[in-house]
Amino acid sequence: MLKNYHKTNSTMKIGVIGAGQIGGTLIRQYTKAGHSVKMTNSTGTEKLKNLAMETGASAVTLPDVVTDVDVIVISIPLIAIPTLSKELFNNISAGTAIIDTGNYYPIRDGRIEDIENGMPESVWVSNQIQQPVIKAYNNILAGSLACSGRAKGDPARLALPVSGDSKQSKDLVATLINDSGFDPFDCGSLQDSWRQQPGSPVYCTDLTLPQLEKSITKAKRELLPERRELGLTFIMKHDPAKWMDWWKDFAEHNRVIYESELT
């Protein structure tokens, strides 16, 4: 059950592209925190009726979801990123923060040569939409995001890394992460965002802020693809429709993979 961990003092207008596991969870958390949320997805607004009734978020068209908002959340598979036209973002308000929650999985997204050759995944996303982005929420399972939030100051509160090149945008994202029940951690520039990609010891291992600060420095870029595949092996053996049944097991599985980097 989602809890309201923090009622924000500043209401934001947020547009969410993609209402899947992560996107849908964020919509619930943002509306509970008092933010005004618009949402859209690839299957059309009709299938968002139940979520709209549950949360009070508005189901709108793709052009509408990016209009007159403070924050845009892109929570779709990387394979779908090129379907977002560059013109879509031409008229967004100045200072609008764009959050990329995605991860690259070749088995789903196909082979993306730039990423295979070392380009950080969110740099690729930024290049595709020709807008600066902030990478956040990509290193946590939807089950953890929905169920593991805690009040600020709780020593067991989990932390989420944030990477990007705009301090203003990162500050907005940090507020939203806090509203979701997690501690934000500034991971550096968007070029540094590889440290929170799949294959990193902070990927879906559910770490507190001190643990994350320590472990993220131990990420090894050359090991990311191999370790990403170890995580995918687990995911492929489980029913994605029953993700709430196995998210804890996946976090434990990843903790075993990265045991040496988590101690």
Image (tube, rainbow, N blue to C red):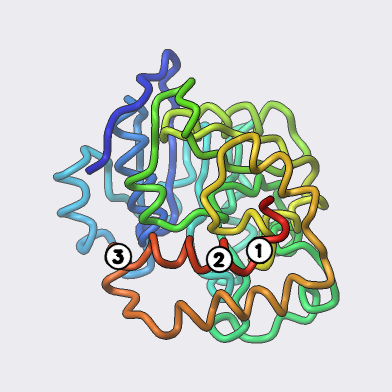
Q: At 78% across and 81% down in the image, what residue appears? A: 113
Q: Quadrant of the N terminus?
A: top left
CB contact under 8 Å: marks 2 and 1: yes
Name the residue that disc number 3 marks: 44
Coordinates of residue 31 in the picture (x, y in percent) = 30, 34
Name the residue that disc number 1 marks: 258
Where disc 2 sits, the SS reads helix
Q: Is residue 189 above or below residue 31?
A: below
Q: At 41% across and 59% down in the image, what residue appears? A: 18
Disc 1 marks a residue whose amino acid type is Tyr
The residue lying toward the viewer, choosing from 157 and 35, is: 157
The residue lying toward the viewer, choosing from 208 and 126, is: 208
Coordinates of residue 90 in the picture (x, y in percent) = 63, 48
Q: Earlier in the sequence, mark 3 or mark 2?
A: 3
Disc 3 marks a residue whose amino acid type is Gly
The residue lying toward the viewer, choosing from 128 and 201, is: 201
| Number of other residues with Cα within 10 Å of mark 3, as a class: few under 14, some 14 to 19, many 20 or more | few
Name the residue that disc number 2 marks: 254
Q: Is residue 1 above or below residue 88?
A: above
The residue lying toward the viewer, choosing from 5 and 217, is: 217
